[in-house]
Image (tube, rainbow, N blue to C red):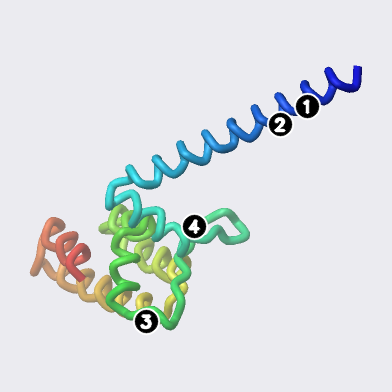
Amino acid sequence: MDRIFFIYLVIVVTGAFLLVDFIKDVNDDDVSMMTKEEKISKRDALYYKEDVIGDTILIIPKTMKYSKKKQILKRSPIFKEIIDSFPMFSEMEALTNEKILDEQLKKELLNIINDIQDKYLSGEIDSAKAKERLYTY
């Protein structure tokens, strides 16, 4: 009886070990087969947090270079949400103030939004040029 139990235990432990090892190999393969965009997206996701009401916010360390901060912002779903809000400039400004916690990024983006608003409302640029200006800021 004890011998059968011991053999059964060895088989179960060996099976569990093989299953865990297989899952680890599959996970490693998934990571190695990620595209460059997927790797960047996964890395960028470290800077997205959820606030107390469930909104996604962008928190970037102050020590990071400004150019890198800007790249992360431009790839973020928050930036897409801001652009999708065009031409509701007050909503664009509210989203920027609420969802971007880096003061330098926030200040520059608000300046761009205000500049685009002035030019768009005065008729200097159309909506396509305004969105292009946002994308290339």
Comparing marks 3 and 2, which lies closer to the viewer?
Answer: 2
Q: CA distance from mark 1 to mark 3?
A: 60 Å
Q: Residues within 10 Å of mark 2 (few under 14, many from 20)?
A: few
Amino acid type shown at disc 4: Thr
Tell whether 51 sits left or right of 13.
left
Q: Secondary structure at mark 1?
A: helix
Q: Residues within 10 Å of mark 1 (few under 14, many from 20)?
A: few
Q: CA distance from mark 1 to mark 2?
A: 6 Å
Number of the label disc, if any, that sits on residue 104: 3
Position of residue 12 relative to residue 98, above or below, is above
Q: Residues within 10 Å of mark 3 (few under 14, many from 20)?
A: few
Closer-to-camera residue (33/113): 33
User: Are the two marked residues, 3 and 4, in contact with CB atoms closer than 8 angstroms?
Assistant: no
Closer-to-camera residue (15/122): 15
Comparing marks 1 and 3, which lies closer to the viewer?
Answer: 1
User: Are the two marked residues, 1 and 2, in contact with CB atoms closer than 8 angstroms?
Assistant: yes
Amino acid type shown at disc 3: Gln
Amino acid type shown at disc 2: Val
Closer-to-camera residue (41/2): 2
Number of the label disc, if any, that sits on residue 9: 1
| Residue under pointer 2 | 13
Q: Secondary structure at mark 3?
A: helix
Q: Residues within 10 Å of mark 4 (few under 14, many from 20)?
A: some
Q: Earlier in the sequence, mark 4 or mark 1?
A: 1
Q: Earlier in the sequence, mark 3 or mark 2?
A: 2
Q: Secondary structure at mark 2?
A: helix
The residue drawn where x is 52% and y is 41% is: 24
